[in-house]
Amino acid sequence: MDTVTIACLVIFILTLLAYAFLSSRISITVLTMVSVCALMLFGCIEPKDVLSCFSNSSAILMASMFIVSAGLNRTQMVRKVSSAICRISKGSFTKVLAGYVILTAILVQFIPSAVACFAVVFPLALGVCREMKIAPSKMMFSIGITAIGTVITLPLSSAVSEMARIQGFLETYDYTSYNMTIFDITKAKLPTMIVILILAIFVIPRFAPDKSAAGSVAAAASGTAPAKKEEPAPLDPVREFIGYATFIAVLIGLLFSSKLGLSSWQIAFIGATVICVSGVLKPKEAIQAMNLEMVLLFVGALAIGTALTSTGVADLIGDHLSGVIVATHNNYLAGLIFFLVPFILTQFMLNLGIYSIFAPLYIMICKSMGANPIGPIMLCMIAAMTAFFTPMATPAVPLMMGAGNYTVKDLVKMGWLPFIIITLVSVGWIMTIYPVF
């Protein structure tokens, strides 16, 4: 390894240690930005690449959806809907949580973006938490892991697009002995989706921290004021209508973004602009709702992931991985390796990047062995799309951390059991129906 790669690895390891031992005293966002500065000074990432992270579309989507969600929370709609849900559920937390988890799982089949779907659901969930006097920390991880882990499962438009993407990989690498169908994705991912829903509703709340007294970040994200301050006066009828109409319009826009010819961030940005220009949120309220701490955390995490990729760390791991798998002659052990490597790496590098690197790599490995690549590709997809231990994995994690006021330690505490169960179910099922050897 050259000196730049070694420097990148050292800085990366120090960053992880700082997360583990210093995050209780120093903001994780500050720690992340210090790491980005170090990576830039040691030549692990170009300054222009750092700047590009600040203009990343997911960062703009996050900040915009925070504002749109805060605009909805500024209206009386959330309060009324939350009261109705509480009456229907008769005060049952499990029933309310089940409703939001299932809603998230449905939405994410139509909007193939965990961060966008979570941003749509969490303000409604925050309203119910407020109504039922439940800490948002008891609910947000369940909704977040559902958005992250169940995306692109059912045989709908998003799955069709992903099937075409995988088939394109197979054709590019001239390995069309095996072909991908839309039902392969559903067949492979459905058991994992069912397990995630069960865990999110019945298991994860038992491990979730009760942060009733905390929640400054959640309050900022939802557009609500801290308990010490007086509730703002209700909006006039026109702004009230604009608040919830904008939210609904953004939701519809996200559902049909491909037909509208607009990307998700553009739709959310337009919605946020309407909320600000119309006066639904005052300038100070909009800035507070933007939750810059979580946005900067994502930007920093993205820069770290970019540095790890550009220094060749992922390629280095892939080369070693291929040798290990070729020497393995057990389906389930090979499947475990296929799953764990992208899962672990995705905690520190953006999930789409890891998936884009390892899906072709797995095809080449399988081609060299004359093996069926469908199983390894599906394991790679599930592993990359169920990363929830660090804010570097996916933009949905910083958003979830803000809404639930979580620390990295909280994520590990809530996530270790789902990780084990998801791994066992995914590897066991997929290596049974799509064996490598």
Image: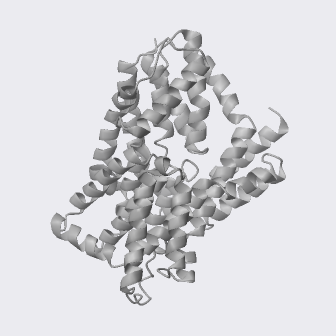
Which sits in the foreground, 124 or 71?
Answer: 71
Which sits in the foreground, 14 or 76?
Answer: 76
Percent across and percent down for residue 250 are: 44, 62
Q: Quadrant of residue 198?
A: top left
Q: Quadrant of residue 136?
A: bottom left
Say whether residue 50 is left or right of residue 100. right
Say whether residue 123 is left or right of residue 355. left
Percent across and percent down for residue 199 are: 31, 46
Image height check: is 224 above or below 267? below
Q: Quadrant of residue 153?
A: top left
- Outermost residue toward the top in this view: 370
Percent across and percent down for residue 334 are: 49, 20
Say whether residue 313 is left or right of residue 343. right
Residue at the location (83% across, 53% down)? 41
Colour scheme used in the picture? one colour
Residue at the location (23% across, 73% down)? 83
Residue at the location (51% across, 62% down)? 268
Percent across and percent down for residue 182 are: 39, 28
Residue at the location (54% across, 16% down)? 366
- Outermost residue toward the front in this view: 260
Which sits in the foreground, 407 or 305?
Answer: 305
Quarter of the figure that contains the N terminus: top right
Looking at the rendered structure, the number of numbered marks drawn on it comes to 0
Image height check: is 155 above or below 38? above
Image height check: is 365 above or below 395? above
Q: Is residue 258 visible in the rendered structure shown here?
A: yes
Q: Is residue 24 visible in the rendered structure shown here?
A: no
